[in-house]
Amino acid sequence: MADFPLLNASANAAANEAPAPVGPLMPTQLAPGGAPIRHRLPGAEAADAGITLSQLTLAALWHVTAWPAALAEVEAALAERVDARPPTPGSWTPGADGAALVRTGPLAWLVLATAPEARAAAPQRLAGPPLDPSLGTALDLSHARTALLLAGPALGAVLARLVSVDTRPAAMAEGRAFTAPIHGHPVQWLARADGVALLLPRSFARGLTELTVETACPYGCDAG
Amino acid sequence: MTGYRLRSGGVVDRTQPLRFAWDGTRYTGLAGDTLGSAMMANGIHTVARGFKYHRPRGIMTAGVEETGALVTLGRGARREPNAKAPAVELVEGLEAWGQNAWPSVRFDVGRINDVMGRFFAAGFYYKTFFGITGRGTGEWMLFERLIRAAAGMGRAADPADMRAGAGAGAGAGAGAGAGARTAGETWDLAHDHCDVLVVGAGPAGLAAAEAAAAGGADVLVIEQDFEPGGRLIGRADGVEGQPADTWIADRVAALHRAGARLLTRATAFGLYDANVVGVFQRAPDANGAGPSGTLRIVRPERVILATGGLERPIVCGGNDRPGVLLAGAAERYVARWGVTPGASCLVATADDAAYETAATLAAAGVAVTVADVRIGAGGPAREAAAAAGARIHDGMVPVRVAGRWTAHHAVQAVALGRVADTDPERPKAPDTPAPEAPASSARGGALAGTGIATAAIERWVEADCLALSGGWSPAIHLVCHRGVKPAFDPAQGAFRIAEDACPEGLALAGAADARADTADAVADGRHAGETAAARLAGRPAPRARPGVTAPTAARLYEVRWRDGKTKAFVDPQHDVTADDVRLAAREGYVSVEHMKRYTTLGMATDQGKTGGLVGLALLAEATGRSIPETGITTFRPPYTPVPIAAFAGRARGADWQPERLTPLHDVQAEAGAVFTDAGRWRRAWYHRRPGEGIETAYVREARTVRESVGMVDVSTLGKIDVMGPDAAEFLNRVYVNGFAKLPVGRCRYGVMLRDDGIVLDDGVSWRLAEDRFWMTTTTAEAAKVMHWLEYLIAWRWPELRVHVASSTDQWAGIAVAGPRARSALSRVVAAAAVDGEALPFMGIVETRATVAGGTVPVRIGRVSFSGELAYEVHVPAGWGAAVWQALATAVAAEGGAPYGTEALGALRIEKGHVTVAELDGRTTLADAGLGRMASTKKAFVGRALMAREGLLEESRPQLAHVVPIAATDAAPAGGEPGTQADAGLTTEAVRTRFGGGAILCDPTAPGGVGGRAGHGIGWITGVTESPSFGGWLGIGFVEGGPAAWEGREILVREPTVDGGKGRETRARVLSPHRLDPDGARMRA
């Protein structure tokens, strides 16, 4: 039988010291790693930022689904792997080493690790598929998504202009997770203490980030 | 009318002047003004022209119900026609222009239409269908031009304006650091959620919101004005023991303390299923740098409609002259803006409320005369008006309004009459002892009859302003958007919504439910707010609904002049007169909906706000029916106009659809690639070299692939991971060919059908493990296939243990094709990994590629779309650019080059491979030449219906190559090449090219369905200049396929090209599988 190590690109990269992967194609409105770019309406150049937008590094991202009969086992296995409480549907829980467990559906999870630095190896606990194949399936999507963090006092106003779901503070309490499209394209949202994280499809990352910056601009947006 | 600013009064900021321009002339208003009040304060009395007759029009209301003062705001790309001046907030630098007039609204040559008014009665344009001389259509074609030229109100910004504004507006919508990607005006679209939405921040709305917030609800209040308070703003009388302005401020403060949100300048324009409310919120300064407005979609748990009431006019002769306005509006101009509409005012009323207008105007120094159709009615308000100096005439009605020639026919005097005692329809107050003996204690009340009165002129009253009040109607438009039918309330003389008719979660409060008295409205609003909060909390409603003060209005819709004819307007916006309504009835348009359309009554921006009910009353009278029997027209969104651009929000220009970029986009762009759209994707179209255009570049690229090696970005292929122990069985059912026995380490081309036996998509599935496949789909159908597979798993075969997940974005894909492909690839990966033994045709391997800075994992399959020796190299997206650069160097070293989608298309056309252009939802396996792929040993989706008789006919269009007949070609059977005589063709010259989409016809059957007069016998799906065959090559479908056309000529028709003249090209039909038919190149 042939060997197909790319089932796990994250681990493969780390183990073989591949060069740094190129980040997703992002718009020029962002300045990752540098001083944030200030976006203000004409006449409001000196205004404080109502929104900060920054890019997060996805060190690992696994899409996990369980066979119906193995739901409880998968839930327990993932919680143990990530060292997190099992999240209820529509929520996420933090784990160890920057990892997190997101319940995206009745039988589906995302297992991810974000990092602030530009290049980050997947934590060892997520270096391989986080699930025994007898329980369900796991798919490496670490190159398929782009992570952003939105924060600031105008967060509510900007979110209301990006998604149709309820984004009032009570509905956006830390730990809430939901999938809602921006401009028709699926985006995973994770409410955090320091703002809201977005997982964008990589191929749409540039366009959706441009749209986000322009939407946030009237409120004063620092993007970096 | 000669309006002017009073020395005091109003809630405008007299320390803050605002400059504005009207028709190019500069004026000054005050902060807090509307455009309407500022124009009135500056003595501008003619602000518009009527739609049809071009009669001069002034300001007729104080809000969105305006039917006269329609103006155009701004200029160029920011021009907005049909703005209602009384509803436009005055801002510094505002520009407004008259419309529907030439050269200006002050002098309009279109006024000639008024002189010829008898030719422009209701439905005149329909009558032009018949023609004056009976020539019908011929004359209509003439009239149509004239009517179309004259039709329309105002002019929207056109594409030329937008282009001109693009340069000037660039940067306006984005920050200094961003640069605007979408130039010009911007609009936002927002989504709001709340427990209780209160529409209207008048007395009832504010009370409702405060009560709901106090009950623990999350409250959102929207108000169309730029200030909350509604008709209370600036009023001297008190509310609940407080001055009105203090009461408003206290309520707003309480809302803020409770965390409620109050949005001003926000109009609810539509109420939809599940009580979703469409709101348009205008920016404070539409000329500012930010969005001009926001379309808000509000999803509340409960809605309280405190939308207030709309005053009805009294229709009489000349009631459209500048200086005629509604009584409530006159009162608001004085109380709120400190502007009087005139120096002398006649208030004609059928309701008590107008006495407040009389008192307010009289107190402001205006000479006021009141004509009340009732006798002795008015109560305390009447006494207050009299005390302020108003002269009151009981039992009098306005009959005719005379205008002043020197002042654009503005009001000069009003003729009053007394309703004839013999008129059976005369409105009467109950318990009135005698017409001549006013009963001071009588409050009026509901009166019987049609509300149509006839009167002779008894006296003239000099006045430069006529304020009319025929009573108030609840503003019920929004609730009617939900399909609720209102019922006529004889006591109110108006339609209203029965309490039990409101949909769940919806309530009316205040004047919107005929509680016009302020105290009643406040009490009712508070009750509605408490009830909403209680319902949300699962508590019963706190108390019974408060009572309501008895209505005071007499029913009076129209006063006819007994002794003459004059134009009396029911809907001044559309120049619909009372006679028009009667004419419609006489001509058979007795249905209220038919009458509306025949006369245009209440259409467009008006939506029947003021004249709608009056029109119904007139129709009822004309047809001898009651108003309930006549019915009411259907109110539909939007309640007020919403700029179309607001619906688009930011989804325009560069943001119309976010671009989808491959991981290899930038690396190709930096190398000079030219891109094209492929659905949402941006794909490299061709890789331009100096001096090259598309025509030369793609041919060079295709030839390079045939002769050496090329590489192309195939990241857009859909990729779906099929996982689980039943993955093989699943694919075996999905594809027409077998996948159950596909060994690990191999891939296979497969085709899947829809249930109806038509091809859905094709692609290659790679077996990575016993329980794992990696499916590629066409770029175009990736999402459709993903949904299809999910559907099959969820609903049709839930017993299968298989999951699917899209991994398209995880991978960058590069196809390396050509005789030197292996050599090129061996420069990047270990040669042993990709030699013919390790990686045979349709084999797969995972290995590492050497790139700058290290090695990266790659997944390689030996798959060919071009017909050459070819490999698909897939790499996790983050390393895509690195692998592209490494391969580009290697390919160049082998004499090759990158190629784009145009060359990709050329190569596959030559090879006869199908794409979505051929698999277009009509194609069967056999049509595409793939009939032998279908397994006869297993079941698969579409198997049963693919065998339908109609799908098996040999005469069905089948895949074929089509090549034009050059002058040097041998003569086909039956004719000489390059001549038309053989088949009766009209082609003037031998053509050598044709385009995609062309129709294939049988030249021997010019009159049949397959001939040039019919729909043809096939079509072209793709064309290219062919490096392999030389010359032009088309691929497409032709009935019977190549076999049926062997040795025969076909005609390629393009009926719409060459400026519509069309073009025909003679061609031959050939097999699509002429290039390397045994596949030796692919398998090399």
Image (tube, rainbow, N blue to C red):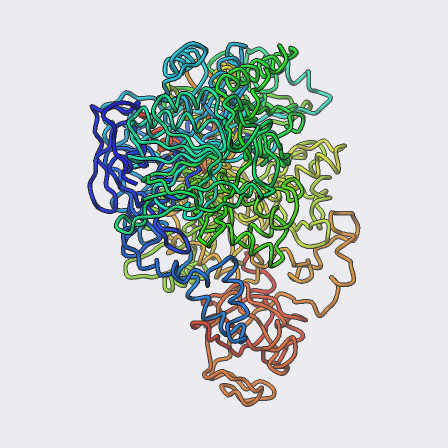
Of the 4 image quadrants, the one containing the N terminus of chain A is top right
* Vertical arrangement, residue B1001 with respect to residue B553, above or below: below
Residue A106: percent from the left, percent from the top? Answer: 65, 23
Of the 4 image quadrants, the one containing the C terminus of chain A is top left
Most foreground residue, B222 or B413: B413
Question: In this image, B493 relative to B798: left or right?
Answer: left
Q: Residue at x 26, y 38 (%)?
A: B94
Residue A109: percent from the left, percent from the top? Answer: 59, 23
Q: Residue at x 45, y 83 (%)?
A: B989
* Vertical arrangement, residue B507 with respect to residue B271, above or below: above
Does the rendering let one see residue B1007?
yes
Most foreground residue, B104 or A186: B104
Q: Residue at x 20, y 44 (%)?
A: B25
Residue B895: percent from the left, percent from the top? Answer: 37, 56
Question: In this image, A36 relative to A145: left or right?
Answer: left
Q: Which of the 4 quarters of the picture holds residue B63?
A: top left
